[in-house]
Amino acid sequence: MINVIFVCLGNICRSPMAEAVFGELCKEEGLELSFRISSFGTSDCEEGNPVYYPAAQTLKKHGITEFTHRACMISLKDIKNADYVIVMDHMNMRDIVRMTGGQYGDKIFQLGYFTDGRDVDDPWYTRDFERAYSSIEAGCRAFLEYLKKEHGKALEYDRLH
């Protein structure tokens, strides 16, 4: 099982959206049993809060209706136990690198790395949840393709069993 965690600042918009989108993509591919998917924030400012309402509405608009979540701050243990840590922007990357002292760099990626290299802008500030969703969805699709290439045989085995 591949442990993937998505990370943003407060864990109420982008990273839970990515968690939900990636989970749906895995389900569509018959790979939901191959992954452990979660999300965290680099801050505890939203600890315990549900997905921000406009983010939840955007997920629903795109057919993701069965998703529950409570915000949680990431820990060093979470990073150590993850196979992939996927951050939403360069500030999240900076926070994770600071938290890890620069360790674990081989498993920490920015979601945009798999597409256009850009940050997933925070819709809390931009108010553009649709644009955030679009960036997240494209990044998650590309990330899943990357994983299928990197772990193809293991994922195919999971799919058949």
Image: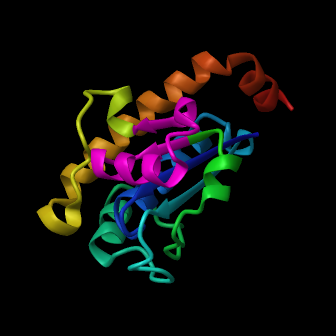
Q: Quadrant of residue 147?
A: top right
Q: What's the magenta region?
A: 85-110
Give the residue drawn at x 65%, y 46%.
82
Residue 127 visible somewhere in the drawing? no
Give the residue drawn at x 27%, y 29%.
117
Q: Is residue 155 above or below residue 87?
A: above
Asked if residue 23 is among those painted magenta in the image, a careful observer would answer no
Asked if residue 92 is among those painted magenta in the image, a careful observer would answer yes
Give the residue drawn at x 29%, y 51%.
91
Q: Position of residue 15 (x, y in %)?
A: 42, 57
Give the residue drawn at x 77%, y 23%.
154
Q: Is residue 93 above or below residue 128?
A: above
Q: Residue furthest bottom?
A: 48
Q: Nearer the viewer, residue 156 or 1?
A: 1
Q: Residue furthest front?
A: 101
Q: Which quadrant would the N terminus be assigned to in this image?
A: top right
Q: Quadrant of residue 149?
A: top right
Q: Position of residue 108 (x, y in %)?
A: 50, 38
Residue 79 falls left or right of residue 14:
right
Q: Is residue 28 above or below residue 131?
A: above
Tally the numbered discs.
0
Residue 130 falls left or right of residue 27:
left
Residue 46 falls left or right of residue 144:
left
